[in-house]
Structures are given as structure tokens and as C-alpha cells.
Amino acid sequence: MTINPEKKLRDLLYKAGMTDVHGSTDIAVHVPRFNSKEVQPGDLFIATTGTSTDGHRFIPAAIAAGATAIVCEVFPPVFADGVTYIRVKNSQEALAYIASNFYDHPSNSIRLIGVTGTNGKTTTVTLLYHLFISLGFKCGLISTVKNVVGEREIPATHTTPDAVRLNRLIAEMVEEGCTYCFMEVSSHAVDQHRVTGLHFAGGIFTNITHDHLDYHKTFDAYLKAKKGFFDMLPEEAFALVNADDKNAKVMLQKTKAKKKTYSLRSVSDFKCRVIENNFSGLLLNIEGTEVLTLLIGSFNAYNLLGIYSTAILLGIEKIKVLTAISTLGAVEGRFEYLTATNHVTGIVDYAHTPDALQNVLTTIRDIRTGNEQVITVVGCGGDRDAAKRPVMAAIACELSDKVILTSDNPRSEDPEVILQQMKKGVPPQHYKKALVITDRREAIKTACSLTRPGDIILLAGKGHEKYQEIKGVKYPFDDKQVLQEEFNIMIN
């Protein structure tokens, strides 16, 4: 990417909330950094305050590495010679504005669409990306699974990148001629000001259920973070919400954007009705026109209606949108399914919240004949909201014939402790249907061994992920690959 190798410090401080300065702002700086380990001579270091570390501790290290300017909330007791210090109200917010200024406000030069919600963000942005690509537009994608600039893929490390990487990605999209960017907006990103300073053409709200309470502590705080995204939308943007979610109106309370709604059940601007739902796909009536799609499940009916509504709001002709929707395939790790020769169906889904798991299992229940078993393999991630663990086990038991509780990404936690917490949610009447197998590969293998022809296996929780994180180490692990290997053994 071609960028100006240095900028004047004073130009980067626009809207950054400067309250005091020590030194001159009429100096050139190279790159804004918030990780002292990445600082190079001539860089600007922003000391951000996070949940686990305080960047102010690393100001000496940044200066030792060559930083010529420091942005912070609290001045150090001693100033280093030849270094400019800028005090700001909020260093995370300042970082976002500085990043936008440094990359010449790239979001002003592209139609940026943000999607937020507990479930459906990745599917919605990915489908939007493929929809607009199929219509001939050059687009960018920022998602949990991957980031895409035109046709160039870049691995994703967070649902929403930090402000510097985010603005750089958008700047690269602009430079490559992209006219649209579709991005996930996480509650963390809003709370940590990662999307502050960006200019959105539209925002979409899919739904909200209990999640990330390990970070937000309360559901109200989580809701407020999601709502904060719509509060920041400009008047010329649109705010599109799923009217069937009881908190949809909350999202629109203070937004200045044009308010639009979509739904399957409520009065709304954009309507859809499910006519047929089976393993061959969904037959939908969208705004009076029938369209056959390759996606499965009522939750995907919402996703498809969301992208249809977005495309219409962006000025695309209805017939072109519906024709393109009929060709869209499943998103990786989102209700992906494969079939063994004995007609056992395996489904891999990222469902890692109670609501998502219930949606997937309800979809399976709705399209099964009733003669087959549903065998669910499910775990819960470590260092995340522990309150949902027994709830997910209860849902799995209620909507499955057999359940295997197993390890997901235990991270720094003991997987046995996580599983004990999940077991507490197993109702007494379902004790006989639930097994606990800590090793995920063994759990999948066991699920396959329990099948009869025609049965359905659901592997929930990891979806697209190609690793399992244990004690801070990521080991290669792919649910879909492991399931395919077991299916091949069954065949042979």
C-alpha cells in the first residue's frame, strides 16, 4: 500500500480530545502505534488503557525504541528530552481519530456497512460481500473468519480489528478501487472505540441475546455497547434492525440515521415468509416474490432478508438482488453439512451461544423426518461467559436424542472444570442421553460410532476455526476435517 511515510503531528490530533501538550506538535511522525514492541524511530506512541494492561507503563519502552511523540491520559512525572507529550481525555478514542487522520479518512471514500448483533454477523457480512461481488462491484470484507481486500485475503485475528489496522484495511480497499466494505462490528469494538471516527453508510442489527458478559458484566452494558454503534451513525446513513427482536427499538432510540426494519413476524419495512425449509434449501417469499435459496433454516431467512433489505437501501434493483440471493451458498462453519454414504448427515456450526445453539437445533428439528437420531457434540469456550455453560447443555439435551459434552477452546481454563459446569445444566430426565468426553476428536469419533443410517450429527461451537486453544497454545483442529475423516472410515 502506498501511504505518506510521515505526517505532521498536529494534523493527526484533529478530534483526538487533546487537553494539554508538552513540546511541539509541529513535528513529523511516522506511524501511530499502541504496542510499544512495534515502535520504530520516529513513531507516535499512544498509551491506551485496556482491560488487562495499561499502556502508560510502556511509555519508557516506546521512547527507548525511538518514539518522538507520546499520547496519553496522564503525563509522566518526568519528560524525556526531545519528545512531545499530548494529554487526551480518552486514549482509546484518541487512537481511533489519529488512525483515521493518518490514513486520510478512508471510510469517507467507500460505502461502509457495519453489522452488529449476537448472532448472524459473520453470515450477514459474508453474504453481502458475495452478493455485491456477483453484481459486479469490487468490495472489501472485515469479518471474524477473514478480511478481504478486493480478492486478496488477510487472516483475521479479531471480529473487529484495532483502530489502526482497521483504518489501514479500509485505506487499502479504497486504493484498490473497492466501492463497498462490509464489516462486523463487535460490542468490544464499540466499547473500546475501535470504530470511532469511521463514516458508515449503514448499520444492521441482527439480534441480541446474553453473551460476552465476562467482558461487559451485565446485559444492560452489553446492550448499551451495541446501541452505541447506532448512536454514532450519521443522518445520511440507514439504521436497519430486525423488528422481531424485542430490543430492536432500543437500538433506534437515539440514532440520527434513517430508521428501517425487517422481519418475518412483525410489521416492518421489509417482509419475508418461509414457504419451505429442508436440507435442499429455503423457499422464501420476499416482498411478494418467491425465491429458492441454497441456505437452510429460519435463522438464515433472517440473514437473507437482512442482506436483501440492505441491497435495496443501497439502491440495487429488486430483481437483481433476488436473482443473486438464489445463488449464494453457505458461509464456512455456518450450518455447513456433509453426508456419508450411509446417509448420515454431519452439520458443522459456529453456534457458541445458547440462542445460536437453540436456533440450529430447532432448524434441524423442523426439517428432520422424526425417524432419525440427532446427536449433538458441544462444548463451551474458556475465559468467556461461564453463565451460559449449563444453559447450553440444557438446550442440547432438550433438542437432541444424544449429547456429547466436550472441550471447545478451554484457553487458560481447565476443560474438566468447564465440563462440570456444563453438566450442572443437564436435566435429571436427560442424564442417560448425555456423555462427557473431554477430548474433542474422541467425542466426534464416538458420535459417529453411535449413528444409524439417516442420523444427524451436529458439531457445535467451533465452526470455521482451524485450531483448538489449550493453555495459550493453538493446536491444529478442524471439526469439518475430523468429521470427514470419520465418515471416510465409516465408508470403508
Image (tube, rainbow, N blue to C red):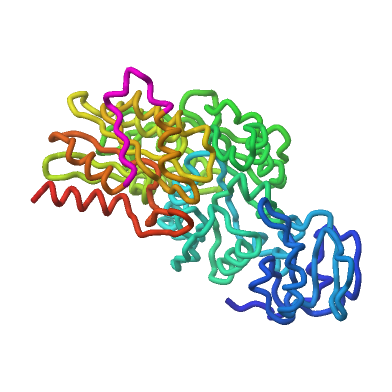
* Residue most extreme to the left: 492
Residue pictured at 35% horizontal, 34% vertical: 297
Report which quarter residue 153 is drawn in: bottom left
Report which quarter residue 8 is drawn in: bottom right
Residue 431 magenta-highlighted? yes
Residue pictured at 13% horizontal, 35% vertical: 453
As rendered, which of 74 and 459 lies closer to the eye?
Answer: 74
As rendered, which of 431 and 374 lies closer to the eye?
Answer: 431
Q: Is residue 122 left or right of residue 96?
A: left
Residue pictured at 59% horizontal, 40% vertical: 214
Q: Position of residue 352 (x, y in %)?
A: 44, 40
In the rendered image, the vertical position of residue 472 relative to residue 78, given as above or below: above
Q: Position of residue 39 (x, y in %)?
A: 68, 75
In the rendered image, the vertical position of residue 372 relative to residue 68, given as above or below: above
Q: Is residue 34 visible?
A: yes
As rendered, which of 368 and 424 lies closer to the eye?
Answer: 424
Residue 141 magenta-highlighted? no
Residue pictured at 17% horizontal, 36% vertical: 451
Q: Is residue 339 left or right of residue 7?
A: left
Q: Looking at the rendering, in which quadrant would you find the N terminus?
A: bottom right
Report which quarter residue 210 is drawn in: top right
Q: Is residue 286 visible?
A: no
Q: Position of residue 461 (x, y in %)?
A: 40, 43
Q: Position of residue 157 (x, y in %)?
A: 51, 59
Q: Is residue 288 left or right of residue 211?
A: left
Q: Which residues are magenta?
A: 424-439
In the rendered image, the vertical position of residue 115 relative to residue 41, given as above or below: above
In the rendered image, the vertical position of residue 350 relative to residue 181, given as above or below: above
As rendered, which of 318 and 4 lies closer to the eye?
Answer: 4
